[in-house]
Image (tube, grey):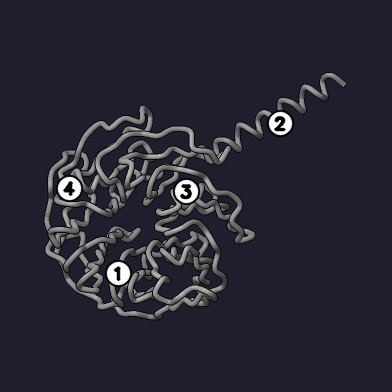
């Protein structure tokens, strides 16, 4: 009997340890507090707050999950945090007012949008050198690099365009006109399709990468919410190709879209002024940053229900998850 109980206890401990490992850690940038909130995804609680540069927004991880890149917009730099020590170890030459960025699959080239200068700055993160500065439209913000490494795409909020940059040459080779104020872009896993949100236009454009032409424009309508408040910003695509989740800003909802048919399946009420999202490691949960309410909503992906709200700092904006 004692051996049975002991074996059960050991098994339970191993399961808990395994679950804790799988649960991982989320890092959330707080625009107004100049800080990063650290969330334990096992307990779903904020466990630490880290001071960083001024007005942190975009976040990105190195591909080995050892480094966290932080757009410190008002400090005009990209900070690099060593996640083992959770300390800033260097500052990269980002150009003025970095807002979003994307890391190339080679784990070295960081493509950064400079909102005030209508530029995309390309930085080699290893030697801390600027490789290129590319003229784009007015108020560049969104940035994505295709998983195959061939394309970097930037959005310009005022010019209303997607700018296609050939990463082999760092030359701007094409532009795609979308609806007003494009804010975010996300590639599918196979690099064949790009999703782009248009905040003021109230739509998401689904774009064929080879032709750089719009395949589908998705509209949103929430009962009881004025259409002017439906402002798509962040997009997150499930890796199995089933769902696209779209953050609808001051509408305070996440739209759930069938990623194959482009049909809007549901709207999930989250916190106020939702910005961006990240999955946990097995994509069973989706985290949303809610700027005005200063919290993170946790969505169960299987049931499409909000299961938890986690208090963080003021005006949470970006979020990433590490093992």
Residue at mark 4 to residue at mark 2: CA–CA distance: 47 Å
Q: Nearer the viewer, mark 4 or mark 2?
A: 4
Cα separation between marks 4 and 1? 21 Å
SS of the residue at dot 4?
loop
Q: Earlier in the sequence, mark 2 or mark 3?
A: 2
Separation of disc 3 and disc 1 at Cα?
A: 24 Å
Which residue, given by chain and number where applicable, does mark 3 sit on?
295
Task: Find residue 12 and name its label.
Answer: 2
Residue 267, image x and y in percent? 54, 68
Could you tell me which residue is drawn at 44 percent across and 63 percent down? 247
| Mark 2 in CB contact with mark 1 (< 8 angstroms) | no
Q: Residue drawn at (56%, 73%), measured in percent from left and top? A: 265
- Of the numbered discs 4 and 1, the one sitting upstream in the chain is 4
Dot 1 surroundings within 10 Å: few (below 14), some, or many (20 or more)? many
Is residue 16 among what the camera can see?
A: yes
| Residue 256 percent location from the top left of the image | 52, 67
Marks 4 and 3, the one that precedes in the sequence: 4
Residue 297 percent location from the top left of the image: 52, 52
User: Is residue 23 among what the camera can see?
Assistant: no
The residue beneath circle 4 is 94
The image quarter containing residue 159 is bottom left
The mark found on residue 215 in the picture is none
Residue nearest the viewer, comparing 292 with 157: 292
């Amino acid at each position: 009997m004692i051996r049975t109980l002991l074996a059960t206890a050991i098994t339970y401990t191993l399961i808990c340890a395994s679950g804790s490992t799988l649960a991982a850690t989320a890092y959330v940038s707080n625009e107004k507090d100049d800080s990063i909130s650290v969330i334990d995804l096992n307990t779903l609680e904020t466990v630490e707050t880290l001071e960083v540069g001024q007005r942190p927004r975009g976040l990105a991880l190195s591909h080995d999950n050892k480094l966290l890149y932080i757009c410190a917009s008002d400090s005009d730099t990209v900070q690099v945090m060593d996640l083992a020590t959770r300390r800033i170890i260097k500052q990269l030459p980002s150009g003025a007012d970095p807002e979003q960025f994307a890391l190339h699959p080679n784990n070295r080239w960081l493509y950064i949008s400079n909102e005030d200068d209508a530029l995309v700055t390309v930085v080699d993160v290893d030697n801390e050198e600027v490789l290129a500065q590319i003229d784009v439209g007015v108020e560049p913000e969104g940035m994505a690099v295709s998983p195959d490494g061939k394309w970097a795409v930037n959005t310009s909020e005022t010019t209303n365009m997607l700018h296609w940059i050939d990463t082999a040459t760092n030359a701007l080779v094409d532009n795609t006109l979308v609806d007003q104020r494009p804010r975010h872009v996300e590639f599918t896993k196979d690099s064949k399709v790009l999703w782009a949100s248009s905040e003021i236009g109230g739509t998401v454009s689904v774009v064929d990468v080879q032709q750089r032409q719009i395949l589908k424009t998705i509209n949103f309508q929430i009962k009881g919410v004025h259409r002017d408040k439906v402002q798509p910003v962040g997009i997150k695509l499930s890796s199995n190709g089933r769902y696209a989740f779209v953050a609808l800003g001051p509408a305070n909802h996440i739209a759930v879209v069938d990623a194959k048919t482009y049909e809007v399946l549901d709207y999930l009420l989250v916190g106020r002024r939702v910005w961006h999202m990240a999955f946990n490691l097995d994509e069973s949960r989706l985290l949303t940053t809610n700027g005005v309410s200063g919290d993170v909503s946790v969505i169960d992906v299987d049931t499409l229900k909000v299961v938890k709200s986690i208090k963080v700092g003021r005006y949470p904006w970006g979020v990433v998850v590490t093992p």
